[in-house]
């Protein structure tokens, strides 16, 4: 698409030629995920997760539409209709388990996808827009999953809705009325359940729209790759089809094996037993935790236990929790190193593996643990590191780090030599932006 | 613009230089803008509590059988209300606290009705994120200050339902209520 050597769509069948003239839809597909899209030849398996995320979205939409055929979004019967799906509807148990575990699988895939972006700095120019749209998708996913979890109207559904909308009550002045407005009442009830169902049905399609923008933005510079060195010649690329359709197909197979293993052998392992108790506004479960994919953010929320100047602890926690994701929007401008791949950034790599990843692991663990010591203190330390990593460490590291020498091209990296590299002036071994640190 | 060159003849100019076409443009866009904003009102307020939800917000409770030291949970606006019959010891403990040292400074008298000091009526909704605190039921954990304890994120309330420890910012809310007789309370 973006490279001059991309193959052009040439339909041979007269019907396809006719269609191509009237509505070039097959051409669009050919250029997006067919032989007309040249892709770096050295992508590793981390580059499978975009396609897997797209698959998960489809899976959620299909199973979700089926569930919506049998589910009743009314506080009087919602719990019973979910049990009706589980016990009476043909294959209903499978659809519901597929949807609930599909949400978990979706988050696993997306977290790996984000991890790839962070380590290989896929968020850097010219791919900032792809990254920004990705963060938007992630926020929409969180909203969708939260509202979906409310629908079965069990104890965790109810108290999750109460606690999460309670976050808004932390906002000064407008907080309480805002929470009442969001719920359509003073506590979660039928009004809240109905609107959550309406939005839970809508948001996945909004996500699908943003995914299209995300891929559109991707196809302008094309995919990055593990070296972070941009594509130079046709030798650096292979056509998406059949090379990456095959590789993605293999990855999808592995994914499906793992997903089905959970779906059929441990369908409740990731859920919470309290959600099989009907919602009871009069009694809170002893230990309320969100779904596992929200744990790191929940830990940051609970890390703030002291008032800070005039800001109450409750508001601080809410601000920090939202800020922990919003900081990703600024990443392309916080990390100023011209080198993309973490493989060629010795200092960045140390902070990444021994700072950010352990901090995330601690937050993840503490978010699922009860709000007691030592978990509160551990979340405080990890939250502090988390913010310091993005706001202080990354800008400093990118200023003082001396990156390792980069290969001349993807082809040189893969084959050990690139005949074109002899033609390049030796003082400028790589593309302009990468030249300065590599040559020094 | 090309079309203006044709239509914007001097006769169309009014005295202050506003052309007829500009006026129509601004008027039309303003009217559409006001209309658009007006439509937002129903779009937004449809999400606020509906009439039936608001109507269900008054409850009467008979408190004659609640012994000192006991509490009951009533329902008000689909949320629990704690009605607690304080013992003399609990009242003394609440009075002994230096009000100025509290996060949300209030004396016991500000939280009960005159002549009914022994009746502490509060929402059973933690002011942190809305869980139902423990301590109203028989044998439940009353926290370090002998009142209520919220297990969700560890907020402790004292015998006057005031926040003493943990993340909650304010005391348990006292709903509007009145004693319609010595044994009947009307909440809301
Ligand atoms: C971004 C994609 C989606 C995510 C992350 C998601 C997530 C969830 C989650 C976590 C639940 C709770 C499952 C449980 O505990 O039982 C749920 C339930 C539900 N979802 Fe979705 N969902 C998505 C898309 C959809 C779509 C497109 C529809 C319908 C068109 C839908 C319809 C439903 C229904 C009817 C339920 C209630 C039944 C049940 O609890 O199993 N979902 N969703
Ligand atoms: S909701 Fe009670 S402590 Fe958080």
Image (tube, rainbow, N blue to C red):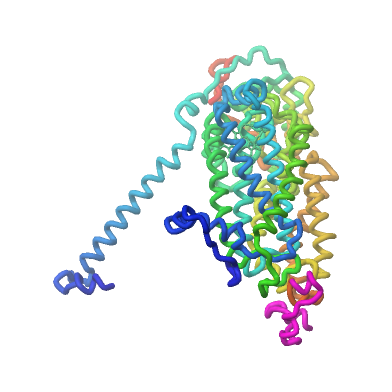
Q: Is residue A429 magenta?
A: yes
- What is the total number of numbered labels drawn onto the structure image? 0
In the visual, does A1 lie left or right of B91? left
Taking the image as drawn, is residue A64 in sight?
Answer: yes
Task: Decide which of B71, A228 is in the foreground and name it.
Answer: A228
In the image, A285 versus B93, the foreground residue is: A285
State the residue in front, A239 or A277. Answer: A239
**Residue lying furthest front:** A13
Taking the view exactly as shown, the residue that stands out farthest to the top is: B65
Residue A148: image location, x then y, percent: 62, 37
Look at the image and give the residue range highlighted in magenta.
Answer: A411-440
Residue A102, x across and y down, in percent: 68, 40
**Left or right placement of residue A270 versus residue A200 in this view:** right
Question: Which x, y percent locates residue B49?
Answer: 49, 33
Asked whether B121 falls inside the magenta stretch, the response is: no
Nearer to us in this view, A287 or A402: A402
Q: Quadrant of ligand 2?
A: top right
Q: Quadrant of the N terminus of chain A?
A: bottom right
Q: Decide whether the magenta segment is chiefly helix, strand or loop.
A: helix
Q: Residue at x 74, y 50 (%)?
A: A250
Q: From this viewpoint, is residue B107 visible?
A: no
Tell me if B185 is positioned left or right of A48 in this view: left
Q: Residue at x 85, y 45 (%)?
A: A374
Q: Quadrant of residue B42?
A: top left
Q: Is residue A129 left or right of residue A361?
A: left
Name the outermost residue toward the left.
B11
- Vertical comparison of B102 with A91: above or below: below
Residue B171 in the image, given as x and y percentages of width and height: 66, 37
Query: Is residue A279 positioned above or below A434 on the image?
Result: above
């Amino acid at each position: 698409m973006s490279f001059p050597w991309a193959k052009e769509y040439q339909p041979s069948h007269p019907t396809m030629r006719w269609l191509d003239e009237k509505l070039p839809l097959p051409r669009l597909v050919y250029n997006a995920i067919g032989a007309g899209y040249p892709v770096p030849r050295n992508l590793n398996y981390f580059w499978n997760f975009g396609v897997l995320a797209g698959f998960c979205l489809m899976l959620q939409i299909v199973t979700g539409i089926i569930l919506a055929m049998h589910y009743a979004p009314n506080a009087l019967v919602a719990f019973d209709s979910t049990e009706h799906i589980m016990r009476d509807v043909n294959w209903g148990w499978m659809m519901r388990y597929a949807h609930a575990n599909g949400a978990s699988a979706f988050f696993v895939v997306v977290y790996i996808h984000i991890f790839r972006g962070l380590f290989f700095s896929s968020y850097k120019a010219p791919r900032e827009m792809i990254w920004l749209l990705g963060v938007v998708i992630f926020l929409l996913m969180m909203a969708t999953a939260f509202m979906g979890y409310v629908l079965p109207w069990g104890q965790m559904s109810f108290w999750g809705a109460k606690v999460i909308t309670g976050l808004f009550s932390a906002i000064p002045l407008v907080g309480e009325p805002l929470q009442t407005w969001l719920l359509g009442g003073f506590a979660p009830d039928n009004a809240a359940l109905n609107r959550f169902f309406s939005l839970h049905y809508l948001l996945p399609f909004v996500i699908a729209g943003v995914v299209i923008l995300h891929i559109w933005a991707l196809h302008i510079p094309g995919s990055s790759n593990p070296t972070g060195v941009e594509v130079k010649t046709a030798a650096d690329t292979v056509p998406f089809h059949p090379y990456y359709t095959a590789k993605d197909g293999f990855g999808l197979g592995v994914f499906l094996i793992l997903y089905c293993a959970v779906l059929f052998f441990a369908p409740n392992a990731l859920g919470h037993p309290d959600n099989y108790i009907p919602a009871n506004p009069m009694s809170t479960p002893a230990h309320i935790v969100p779904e596992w994919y929200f744990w790191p953010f929940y830990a940051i929320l609970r890390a703030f236990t002291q008032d800070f100047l005039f800001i109450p602890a409750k508001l601080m926690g809410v601000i920090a929790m939202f800020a922990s994701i919003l900081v990703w929007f600024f990443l392309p401008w916080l990390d100023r190193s011209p080198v993309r791949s973490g493989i060629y950034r010795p200092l960045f790599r140390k902070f990444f593996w021994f700072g950010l990843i352990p901090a995330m692991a601690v937050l993840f663990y503490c978010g699922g643990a009860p709000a007691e010591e030592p978990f509160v203190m551990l979340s405080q330390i990890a939250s502090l590191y988390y913010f310091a990593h993005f706001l202080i460490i990354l800008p400093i590291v990118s200023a003082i780090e001396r990156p390792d020498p980069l290969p001349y091209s993807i082809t040189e990296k893969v084959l050990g030599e690139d005949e074109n590299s002899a033609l390049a002036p030796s003082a400028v071994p790589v593309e302009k932006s990468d030249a300065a640190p590599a040559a020094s | 613009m090309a079309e203006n060159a044709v239509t914007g003849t001097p006769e169309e100019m009014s005295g202050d230089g506003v052309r007829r076409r500009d006026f129509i443009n601004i008027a039309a866009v303003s009217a559409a803008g006001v209309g658009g904003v007006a439509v937002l009102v129903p779009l937004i307020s449809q999400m606020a509590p509906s009439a039936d939800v608001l109507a269900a917000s008054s409850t009467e409770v008979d408190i004659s059988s609640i012994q000192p030291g006991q509490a009951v949970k009533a329902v008000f606006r689909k949320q629990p209300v704690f009605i607690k019959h304080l013992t003399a010891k609990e009242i003394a403990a609440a009075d002994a606290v230096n009000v100025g040292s509290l996060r949300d400074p209030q004396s016991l008298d500000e939280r009960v009705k005159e002549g009914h000091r022994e009746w502490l009526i509060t929402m059973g909704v933690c002011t942190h994120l809305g869980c139902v605190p423990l301590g109203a039921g028989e044998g439940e954990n009353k926290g370090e200050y002998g009142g209520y304890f919220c297990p969700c994120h560890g907020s402790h309330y004292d015998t006057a339902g005031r926040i003493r420890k943990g993340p909650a910012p304010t005391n348990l809310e006292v709903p509007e209520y009145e004693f319609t007789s010595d044994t009947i309370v009307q909440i809301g």
